[in-house]
Amino acid sequence: MPNASKSLLSYGVPALVLVAAIAVFPSLAPNPYILSSGVIVLNWAVLATAWNFVGGFTGYISLGHGALAGLGGYATGLLITKADLPSFVALIAAAVLVAALAVPIGFAALRVRGASFVIVSIALVLILLLVFQSWSSLTGGSRGLVVPRPFPGMLRPEHHRVFFFLYGGLLLIALATWWLLDRSRFGMGLKAIREDEDKAESLGTPTFAYKLTVFVISAAFTALAGGLYALWFGDLDPVFQFSVLTGSYVVLMALLGGVRNLYGPVLGAIVVGIALEYFKVEFGNTPLHLVTTGLLLGLVVMFMPDGVIPSLTTLVQRLRKREDSSIREMSAADLAEQRREREAANS
Amino acid sequence: MLVFQSVILGLLLGGLYALLAAGLTLYFGIMRVVMIAHSAFLILAAYLAWWTNERLGIDPLLSLVVTVPLFFGAGVLLQRGLLSRLRPATLTMMSVLITFAIALIIEGLLGYAFSGTQRRIQLGYGTASFDLFGARVAVVKLIAFGLAVVSLAGLYLLMKRTQFGWALRATIQHQDAARLVGIDTERTAGFGFGLGLATAAVGGTALSLDTTIYPSLHWHWIGPLMAIIVVGGLGSVPGAAAAALVLGLAQSLLQIPMGATWAQTVFYVALFATLAVRPQGFFGGRLAQRF
């Protein structure tokens, strides 16, 4: 079974490495600052993976996932402070709320193809920023919203450690869900939408329902990440929660790592997330952040729209075998090989 | 009287929206590209006008002599150098990302060069206004409106009366057919983008006359502009103009009961409502179906 060993190699081994890395990082981190950076990077990893439910499967690119995370954070915070719910009940309730809200948003955004989705996703960020800044009686406006800590009395490093593991768990659940969808009939339909929506529809795939469903799943995971962030960080400000930059960082991470690969967004999140933290320490908050992000995004889109992992694999393959590259996942030679094996087994 | 005043102001604002939306419609018509950076170029032009006034001490309107050809060239370069090199299969999504990246770069560079401080042009005639049937109309607003109307009219004449305009419209209508009758569609598409970006140069200069500008201001423009082209129905310049006037008027009128911040939401409400009820837009042409 060459396929099984291949899938074990490309899914199983990275999964083990990831689990091990999540398990040992908190004890290896030399100081609480590094640990908190780890939490931030994991937050990005969850956001990028959640984004990839829509971006990777259907090819619809959302620049507004930052807004969904912000909504998740604010919903969690408001449910705790205004409705007196326990922290983690509020987190789940917030994710359900955001998922419910994603239905009408997705309905408007996905009814027609292509660009309107991007437009709606950007508009979502802008309108939510406007609303959350102006409606200060509910949200605290620009003064921010203080979210009570879920574990009062816990020391700062311990707090980081707990949230690191919470984020790690959420990331693994998100990855497992993506992996399951990838292998399901539903996932097949979604990928058919990405490749050719007209053909998918004419073959009987309920494209609109599929797109909407996966958008809602993606929104729920994004909201969970945003809610966890609210519980961890404890202070929300509309300018940061509903920033267009959040969404563009997520897109950059997913594209850089590769949207067709399970671990692509995680890899992108680790690279870009660490770079972001590093730049914040070295250069502070300057407008050059925007320039760097823009340049990187432009370079990725122009030169490796499939991401680093596929680009590197093809490079390695070309160096090793000098094979002709092909857009098909299996080349004609592979298929002939399979047929020979089948015939050999039958005879 | 307040209402009449708002109607006048709304129409004047709508004129500017219409000019900018015309540029966006052009891009979409030519390549099915949603150009996020349009409003970033708008703010860039406004900054250049402000800088002309501040450093050289001449009228900001004179900056048009430089910015219009400059932006035209930038538009041609953008189309030839970046957008036409993207893979056709993923063009719509990737072009959004690339123009988004350009918007971020422009915003960052503006912030770096001029800092985040809010800037405003001080003009001798900046506070002058006159009476129109009881409504006070600022002269600068009228100049901005005049600029928009003149450019729109020029654009219209160019599209309808010149050979280049015919070639451009043919390219928009059916690229392959246009190529068959001997039109160099690639060059025409490049010039079309230049033309679209030139509207941002004119719009930015008009905007700088009576608006306080700062680097991230373009996000306040791209949302409304996107809403306008969606409500108007893509591919139709008259549709965009009509939607621009209606929404500009609505924003201006809603400012009376709701205040300036909440009045902005009218664009987003219109955007969501249009997509949910009538995705092809209210004045939409054939192109809108493919949006």
Image (cartoon, rainbow, N blue to C red):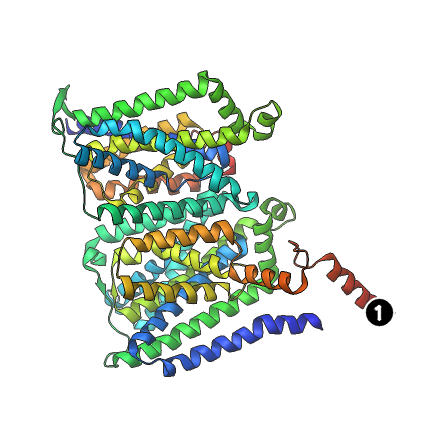
Residue B265 picture location, percent across and down = 29, 43
Which residue is pictured at 21% across the width and 55% down the height? A141
Viewer-proximal residue, B208 or A141? Answer: B208
What amino acid type should be assigned to the residue bearing mark 1?
Ala
Residue B21: tell me if it is visible: no
Q: In which quarter of the image is residue A240?
A: bottom left
Residue B171 picture location, percent across and down = 53, 28
Which residue is pictured at 40% across the width and 51% down the height? A295
Task: Report crowding for label 1: few under 14, some 14 to 19, many 20 or more residues within 10 A (C-alpha).
Answer: few
Residue B233 picture location, percent across and down = 43, 33
Which residue is pictured at 39% across the width and 54% down the height? A248
Residue B194: tell me if it is visible: yes
Residue A135 picture location, percent across and down = 22, 52
Q: In this view, does B124 lie above or below A206?
A: above
Which chain letter matches label 1?
A
Q: Quadrant of residue B146?
A: top left
Left or right: where does residue A222 sit relative to residue A17?
A: left
> Which quadrant of the rendered structure holds the C terminus of chain A?
bottom right
All told, the count of numbered labels is 1
Viewer-proximal residue, A42 or B184? Answer: B184
Q: Provide the residue designation for mark 1.
A: A344
- What element does badge 1 sit on? helix
> Which quadrant of the rendered structure holds the N terminus of chain A?
bottom right
